[in-house]
Image (spheres, grey):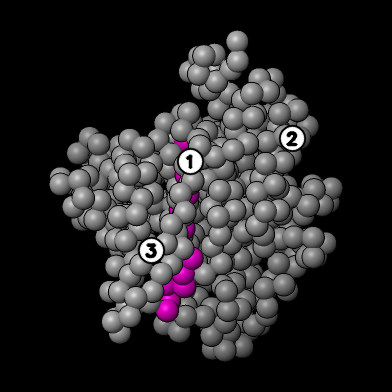
């Protein structure tokens, strides 16, 4: 994971070569503002007590309160949390949100906990980090293996600690507790808007075959949108296996099987024209569009040479290592970077926070009507930077974000950040 953080920071150095920023801006952005590590002790259903390591990082709050999800994963680590918070800082800047970047995690496999144990763990997290979070300071949200139900428990716990309702402390909540319509598929929808806006520039006007790696909420949603738009979904995978069907898969039909059995591969056993393959073969399928929608570091030095896609749309955070990124660029494969491609999720989280603050809630159509122009405008801005400077889209996105962050840092005044 240290390589992951260093790879993320290397993007800062690369972007700095293409924009004029004060060296101390770069120095400020190399280190997180605040990190807290703790252990959560909870009572298990059998009466025993068990502890879990937990983290929260507030990377930078120059542009506003920090914002970022909380993931529950057995492989979670401090370096991963800091890296994700760094990415969130730049992601919020890319789409112009008045937020900085944050992230949190608990090292746990939530599938091994009962619902009551999961609730106690979630409420314990809020107790431990109550002084670090808040609607004007740090605003968590769902991430890997967390969902609206967990966010509802957390928001309720924080409100109990404060002594009054405080829905704006967390986004991604159930609708009944102040959640926003349109949030569930926002990450995928934002990525789809980016893709449609850049369709001509990316030359996606011939055969359109797509492969989706990762079939959780974002993977299923983008699959459905692409399918409805006329794309042929020839490959789908989850953590247990993958499917390949040259004539195309129906994402909703695959999803029904996954909900029933827990594995997309079980869909293959019911259809003779569908081949069950592994993740390595899925990533190597020839296609016009590859959508990594799972975890970090899925495309790396060990498999990058097998990638056979024209465009990669990063719905996951950091699915491509920095070394693999260079190889893809040399092969002419266009990568639409995560800090742009999956920014729809945090944008609609911002909308939820705004609605909570106003006490006035929007329809799903209103949410989508507000999201679409933001994603389209910033997509073209990043594309134009990439084209004018002859640099990859990832570097262009960091250049754009760095310019926004630099302006905000300098606007705070020289006495705040710079030596006389």
Who comes first in sequence, dot 2 or dot 1? 2
Q: Check if mark 3's residue and mark 2's residue have beta carbons within 8 Å.
A: no
| Circle 1 residue | 34
Is label 1 in a helix, a strand or a loop?
Answer: strand
Q: Which image quarter: residue 197?
A: top right
Q: Which residues are magenta?
A: 100-112
Residue 282 visible? The answer is yes
Number of on-image labels: 3
Q: Check if mark 3's residue and mark 1's residue have beta carbons within 8 Å.
A: no
Instruction: Report the mark closest to the observer, 3 or 2.
Output: 3
* Secondary structure mostly seen in the magenta stretch: strand
Crowding at dot 3, Cα within 10 Å, few <14 / some 14-19 / many 20+, comes out as: some
Who comes first in sequence, dot 3 or dot 2? 2
Between 284 and 29, the one lying in front of the other is 29
Q: Residue at x 32, y 61 (%)?
A: 124
| Circle 2 residue | 14
Residue 27 placement, left or right of 72: right
Q: Position of residue 234 (x, y in %)?
A: 64, 69
Between the C-alphas of marks 2 and 1, the distance is 25 Å
Is label 2 in a helix, a strand or a loop?
Answer: helix
| Circle 3 residue | 40
Q: Is residue 38 above or below residue 361?
A: below
**Magenta highlight on residue 107:** yes
Q: Residue at x 55, y 55 (%)?
A: 78
Between 44 and 367, the one lying in front of the other is 44
Q: Residue at x 38, y 49 (%)?
A: 140
Which quarter shows the N terminus? bottom right
Between 229 and 350, the one lying in front of the other is 350
């Amino acid at each position: 994971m240290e390589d992951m953080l260093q790879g993320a920071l290397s993007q800062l150095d690369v972007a700095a070569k293409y924009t004029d920023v004060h060296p101390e801006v770069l120095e400020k952005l190399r280190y997180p503002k605040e990190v807290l590590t703790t252990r959560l002790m909870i009572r298990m259903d059998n009466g025993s007590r068990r502890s879990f390591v937990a983290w929260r990082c507030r990377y930078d709050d120059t542009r506003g309160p920090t914002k970022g999800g909380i993931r529950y994963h057995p492989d979670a680590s401090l370096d991963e949390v800091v890296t994700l918070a760094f990415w969130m800082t730049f992601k919020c800047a890319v789409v112009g949100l008045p937020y900085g970047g944050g992230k949190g995690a608990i090292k746990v496999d939530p599938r091994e906990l009962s619902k009551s144990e999961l609730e106690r763990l979630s409420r314990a997290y809020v107790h431990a980090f109550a002084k670090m979070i808040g609607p004007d300071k740090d605003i968590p949200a769902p991430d890997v293996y967390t969902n609206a139900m967990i966010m509802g428990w957390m928001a309720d716990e924080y409100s109990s600690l404060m002594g009054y309702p405080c829905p704006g402390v967390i986004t991604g909540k159930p609708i009944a507790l102040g959640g926003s319509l349109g949030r569930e598929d926002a990450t995928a929808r934002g990525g789809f808007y980016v893709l449609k806006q850049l369709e001509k520039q990316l030359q996606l006007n011939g055969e359109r075959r797509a492969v989706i790696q990762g079939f959780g909420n974002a993977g299923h949603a983008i699959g459905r949108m692409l399918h409805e738009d006329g794309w042929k979904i020839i490959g789908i995978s989850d953590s247990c296996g993958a499917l390949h069907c040259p004539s195309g898969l129906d994402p909703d039909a695959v999803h029904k099987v996954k909900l029933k059995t827990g594995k997309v591969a079980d869909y293959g056993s019911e259809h003779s024209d569908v081949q069950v393959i592994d993740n390595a073969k899925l990533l190597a399928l020839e296609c016009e569009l590859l959508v990594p929608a799972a975890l970090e570091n899925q495309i790396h030095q060990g498999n990058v040479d097998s990638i056979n896609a024209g465009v990669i749309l990063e719905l996951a955070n950091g699915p491509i290592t920095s070394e693999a990124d260079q190889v893809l660029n040399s092969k002419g494969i266009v990568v639409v970077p995560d800090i742009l491609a999956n920014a729809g999720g945090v944008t609609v989280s911002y909308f939820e926070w705004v609605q909570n603050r106003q006490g006035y809630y929007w329809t799903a159509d209103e949410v989508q009507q507000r999201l679409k122009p933001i994603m389209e405008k910033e997509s073209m801005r990043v594309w134009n930077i990439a084209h004018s400077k002859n640099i990859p889209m990832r570097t262009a996105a960091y250049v754009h974000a760095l310019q926004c962050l630099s302006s905000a840092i300098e606007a705070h005044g020289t006495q705040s950040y710079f030596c006389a």
